Image: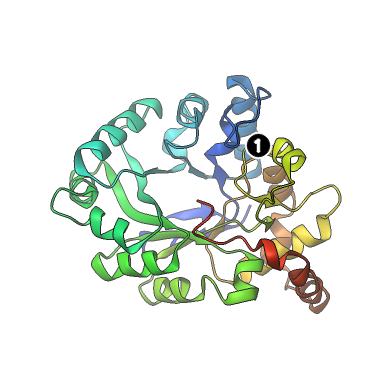
Amino acid sequence: MRQNRLGRTGLKVSAIAYGGIVSTMSDFANYTYSGDGQQASDDYVATALEAGVNYFDVAPRYGDAQEKLGNSLRGIRKNITLACKTRWRDYESAARDAERSLKLLHTDHFDIYQLHALGSIEEVERAFAPDGVMRLMEELKKSGTARFLGITAHSEGAALKALELFDFDTVLFPTNWQMNMAIGYGDQIIRKARERNMGVLGMKSMIERGFGPDDDELRSRWPKSWCKPFDPDTQSEMLLAAMKYARTMGPDTLIPAGDIEHFRFAVEHADEIWNASLTQREKELLESHLPVVRDLLFMPEQNR
C-alpha cells in the first residue's frame, strides 16, 4: 500500500490507517454486539498488516479496543506507528489514562499521543491551565514516552485555538464530503496545518450523514459508528466518491469507519482512492446527494 510522509514527523504512514474501534467488542449506541473477540482482532490486524497498513490509532474511549489491539500487536510493535489519545483535560486524570494505555498496549512509548475530541474553546483552555493535561503531554514528549504530540477534534474553532497555543505535530480532523461541500468544514484547519508542515489525519471520510431518530436498524448494523456510513453493498459508488473527495482535502492518511466491513473496503480500494482523480461524475453524484441528507448534516457538536 502507498505510504505518505506524515508532515514534519518524518514518519511514513500507510494511506489507509487501522482505527482501533475495529478491534473492540463494545458498541456505542447501547446495542448488543458480541461478534468480535480477541481472535477476531488478531485476524483483523493480520489482514491490515498483509495489506501494508502500518498506522494504528486507538483511544481509551473505544471500549476494550486498547486491550484487544494491544494483544494483537504483540511482537510487531516496532514495525508499526501507534497513536493513542486522552480525553482528560486535567493533569492527574490524564497521567493515569496514559499509564493505563501503555500497559494495555504492551508498549513503553506512543509514536503519537493526542488530545482527544477537543469540542470547545473552553476545553482547550482547561487543557492549557496550569494543572491541565498539556503539562503531561510536554512531559511525555520530553521523556520520549511520546515521540510526537497531536490533537483530534470535530470543532474547527477548538482545533484552531489549540494550534494558537502549542506547536502540535499532527491533527486528526473530519475530511467528510458532506461537511466540507456544504459549509467548507475542514478547510481552515487543514490549511493551517499545512502551513506548519503538520501531519494531517482524515476521519469520517466514509460517513454519509448523522444517524436520525428512526435509524435503530442502521445503528444496530453499524454499532461501532457514531454516525451513518455509506453502505458498501448498496452505495459502493458513493462510498468510493466520498473517500476520493476526502483525499482531495489533503490528508496524509484516512482512518475508515469503525467496522471491519468498511475497513476492508478502504483497503481494497486504496490505490484507486489515492491514485485516481475525483471524476466530474463522482463530484456531481455527491452534489446531487447533498440535499437528500442536508437535514441530517453530521455536525461537529453532536457527534464526537
Residue name at image x 66 percent, y 64 percent? 274
Q: Residue 240, image x and y in percent?
A: 76, 60
Q: Where residue 100 sits: x, y (%)?
A: 32, 29
Quadrant for residue 6, please give it.
bottom left
Q: Which residue lies furthest to the front in this view?
A: 213
What colour-coding does the image apply?
rainbow
Above/below status of 143 relative to 34: below
Name which residue type carries label 1. Answer: Pro
For label 1, the residue is 223
Query: x, y percentage for residue 46?
Result: 62, 32
Count of numbered marks: 1
Give the residue displayed 28% in from the left and 31% down from the top.
Answer: 99
Outermost residue, right side: 234
Q: Which of 21 and 273 is in front in this view?
A: 21
- Give x and y (percent) for residue 209: 68, 58
Element marked by disc 1: loop
In the rendered image, which quarter is residue 8 located in? bottom left
Residue 246 vertical position relative to residue 187 in the rendered view, above or below: above
Res 88 quadrant in image: top left
x 54%, y 52%: residue: 303
State the residue in front, 111 or 203.
203
Q: Residue furthest left?
A: 130
